[in-house]
Amino acid sequence: MIRSIAFATVLLAPVAAFAQELPTAPYLPLDLATQAAQTAVEACSAEGHNVSVAIVARSGNTKVLLRADNAGPHTVGSSTGKAFTSASLGRDTAGLAGFIGGNPQNDGLRDMDSRLVIQAGGLPIKIGGALVGGIGVGGAPSGDIDANCARAGLDAIGAE
């Protein structure tokens, strides 16, 4: 019996040591993502705009997608693309549009990935300085309004 316990301990010790060395990475919990998206939809609705709001994880995978009643069909793709762009590149989409427009040598960024949407309304989600995702809003009459609604969502969860 003692021999069996000693043998099991020897076999499992490397597994326990390996598990302790695994890296950890910050992530965006679903409840925070949902809260940010709901707040962004409500902020735009308060101004009379029917929008879609997408939240993607750092990986670019969609975590939350909300579409306001009567939001146009194009708003889903727009919001998802803006969120993906912000998470992927770690910057706001309005600033990215200016970066590309003001520097012709950067124009290739537009074609780097078919999921990129380079229009105002996407913001990176940073918590504690770590990039954990992106939020995108689509459907308001201007990208600035989209971005303001996205900012309201981030403010609601204390994101940078």
Image (tube, rainbow, N blue to C red):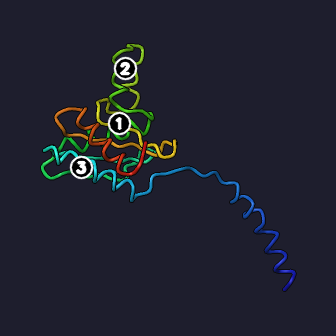
**What numbered label is drawn on residue 41?**
3
Q: Of the residues shown, which amino acid type is indicated by label 1?
A: Arg
- Bin the neighbour count of mark 3 within 10 Å (Cα to Cα): few under 14, some 14-19, many 20 and up: many
- The amino acid beneath tag 3 is Val
In this picture, residue 41 sits left or right of residue 131: left
Amino acid of disc 2? Ile
Picture mark count: 3
**Could you tell me how far apart the alpha carbons at marks 2 and 1 are, in whole angstroms?**
16 Å
Between 96 and 17, the residue placed more toward the observer is 96
106 w.r.t. 148: above or below: above
Of 55 and 110, the residue lying toward us: 55
Q: Which residue is pictured at 25% across the width and 32% down the height?
A: 144
Front: mark 3 or 2: 3
SS at mark 3 in the image: helix
Image mark for residue 98: none
Q: Is residue 66 left or right of residue 7?
A: left
Q: Find disc 1 in the rendering and name its residue.
A: 115
Q: Estimate the spatial distance between the alpha carbons at disc 3 and disc 2, rounded to whole Å.
A: 28 Å
In this view, the residue in front, 100 or 146, is 146
Which residue is disc 2 drawn over? 100
- Where residue 63 sits in the image (x, y, percent)? 37, 53
Looking at the rendered structure, the secondary structure element under dot 1 is loop
Q: Residues within 10 Å of mark 1 (few under 14, many from 20)?
A: some
Q: In the image, 121: left or right of 59?
A: left
- Is 22 positioned to the left or the right of 155 in the image? right
Name which residue lies at 32% across and 41% down: 151
Q: N-terminal of the two: label 1 or label 3?
A: 3
